[in-house]
Amino acid sequence: MIAIAVILWAIAMTLDLCLVQGPSMTAKLCGLAEKLSYAIFVSLLVRWTIVGFEDVRPVDDIYRTTNSVLNAAIKNAKQRIWILETWFTRDGDAGKIIETGANDIRVVLASFGPESQIFARIEGRNIEVTNAQSRVYSSISRFVDEGKENLVKFYSKHYPAFVYVLDEEVFWGSFPINIDSHFHDYLIQRDDISNEKGAFWADQFNLAWQKSHSFEKECDYNDYLKKAAEQN
């Protein structure tokens, strides 16, 4: 249809071609060709507009990944493991992180300091404070047992998301109100640290790390950590 419209329009605009039939015929043929070409163009434009509004479908999220991919990336990391979390969802995550032998390991977990945002977060999920403190302790007990508690810091400010910077990949996801952030795979995103979005979340981790405090300081707020420190 586009080709027909273009041909008709070209005929209308090319007077030399139309003059073969004489002046009177020229005017009629050129006028008819021009009107037909415009009619086709308008009908196509209307059709494309309708299709554009009717057939818009959601595009798959190219950044979406899964917990299994994230866990494999942790296990396979060789150079860098940066993690911003409230606590680990699996007790074995600390051991898995240490066993990678990665050169740059930094873990930021939730603080229970008096100004901490963690209290509002656990209230929405119906988790008792002592339960939440125990989860943080379980997350880092392996670090404490091996004398690597300096790799862990604690953050009491705003938690926008969980962030995992694993070598050159960045995984992140939002924190829902009432469920664990790893409950649904579709909440987990993935990108390269060289890309704009990946670099953004890596910077967010750095901000949290800079504003976090040490394991020794957190012992003032979490009795489980304090007992672990005394036993070691």
Image (cartoon, helix red, strand yellow):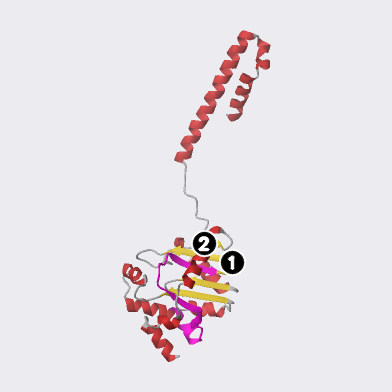
Residue 75 in the image: state x and y as whole percent: 55, 74
Residue designated by label 2: 200
Q: Residue at x 61, y 10 (%)?
A: 25
Q: Residue at x 33, y 69 (%)?
A: 120
Disc on res. 168: 1
Give whichever of 35, 210 is nearer the camera: 210
User: Is 228 on the left or on the right of 44, as rendered?
Assistant: left
Q: Quadrant of the C terminus?
A: bottom left
Residue 201 in the image: state x and y as whole percent: 50, 64
The kind of secondary structure element at disc 2 is helix
**How many numbered discs?**
2
Q: Closer to the N terminus: mark 1 or mark 2?
A: 1
Q: CA distance from mark 1 to mark 2?
A: 13 Å
Q: Amino acid at mark 1?
A: Glu
Q: Is residue 159 magenta?
A: yes
Q: Is residue 148 magenta?
A: yes
Q: Residue furthest front?
A: 211
Disc on res. 95: none
Residue 227 in the image: state x and y as whole percent: 39, 88
Residue span colored magenta: 139-165
Give whichever of 51, 116 is nearer the camera: 116
The kind of secondary structure element at disc 1 is loop
Residue 155 in the image: state x and y as whole percent: 43, 73
Using the rendered view, name the quadrant where residue 90 is placed. Answer: bottom left
Q: Amino acid at mark 2?
A: Phe
Residues packed near mark 2 inside 10 Å, few (<14), some (14 to 19) or many (20 plus) = few
Give whichever of 28, 112 is nearer the camera: 112
